Image (cartoon, rainbow, N blue to C red):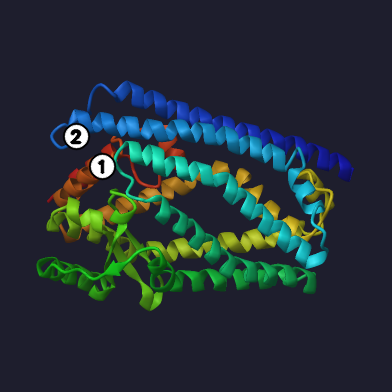
Amino acid sequence: MKNLISYYFQISFISLILINHFIEIYLCRRQFKTFKNAASHLPQEFSQFISLEDHQKAIKYSSSKLFVSQIRLLFDATLLLYWFPFRGAQALYSSIPLTGIHQDALFLILFILIQFGLGLPWSIFSTFWIEEKFGFNKTTPKLFIKDQLKGLILGGIFLIPIMYLILYLFNAFSQSWWWISFLVMTGFQFFLLWIYPTWIAPLFNKFSPLESEELKNGISQLVQKAGFKAKEIFIMDASKRSSHGNAYFTGLGKNKRVVFFDTLLKQLSHQEILAILAHELGHMKLKHIPKSMLASIGFSFFGFWLMGMMAQSPWFYQGHFFKSQSAGILIFLFTQAIPLYLFWFSPLSSWLSRRREFEADAYAAENTKSQHLIEALLKLYQQNSSPVITDKWYSRFYHSHPPALERIKHLESLKT
């Protein structure tokens, strides 16, 4: 009976790989068609702010990225078929001349390094061909190599010890390992979130305070309303890698900060910058960050609980084409196989993220002017070559922010 369960699970898993990637390619084709149909004309709502030339550049830029993503999807599907049905992961595990924790750890480390090596050409192509072709890339080969090496070193410093600790817990606590591991991982994630703004991010970029007194005064008023501190507003030298503009919220406790790309400050007026800041502060004021963290913790708890349930189930390993059974393989399955099952929840996650963006926009409109945020967004769409049109189903699966037209209409309705 167990062999029969494993056999049906294997068939279902292969089907899932193929169906998921077929759906993703189908969604890409829908987006391609939308771009093609809209390339010759600009939606009337944007005609006063974005030129037809900029609109067509955005279509070409996004189409180029979409074309590469389709090839990447086929590549990823082939790779998944190799690791699982063709038992490449099992072969990698069996080839390691070690036993116990060390075999599991080396298996995971080798897999990460292989995946990193396979993904590197895609990053190089994206950075030095697509971004370069459309005038966005500012990264030099030297800087690119330094970034990759820093990422590998940091990954080794943080991931290898935590990996060994979880493998140890699995072997030392047969029944309670999963919830102890959950507590360890949760603490580790909070630790990373806390140190990221002050220790990790500065390894890649320089952060400096604002210099404009006029902008400082406007910021002080906004952050005071939000219960934030003005010293937590920083400018990042993003221009050394790209000409794209953006802003983000990061950190935990005293290390919280809002970060503006220096490219953003060059593109927007002071009033528009304040509107963008108000949007970011809205996420904090409306507790979007804590809510996301709580949801992540709950999801993590469920994941570790499920790992605990599956740890001693031979059919689960066999159902994913493994003959061996160990903590390292269990971790591999939950990081590489389980995301395939979660793909169908993408629309729900995207919908929740878009709803929070609407709420942050409303907060910004209440504390600045919606017209300023509209103008800032339109400039960002133009400067970043972001298309103002999209296929609705593609957007529902992939976009964490509302489509441009929906977002602008929502802001228009908030004008007073």
Dot 2 or dot 1: first in sequence order is 2
Give the labeled residue for mark 2: 46
Percent of width and height locating residue 66: 43, 33
**Secondary structure under badge 2?**
helix
Residue at x 22%, y 33% (from the top left corner) = 54
Vertical position of residue 396 compared to residue 42: above or below: below
Dividing the picture into quadrants, the one containing residue 65 is top left
- 10 horizontally vs 284: left or right: right
Residue at x 40%, y 38% (from the top left corner) = 129
Q: Which mark is residue 381?
A: 1
Percent of width and height locating residue 72: 53, 36
Residue at x 23%, y 73% (from the top left corner) = 230
Q: Which mark is residue 253?
A: none
- Whether residue 9 is visible: yes
- 153 horizontally vs 7: left or right: left
User: Residue reaching furthest right?
Assistant: 1
Question: Does the residue at mark 2 contact the one at mark 1 (Cβ under 8 Å)?
Answer: yes
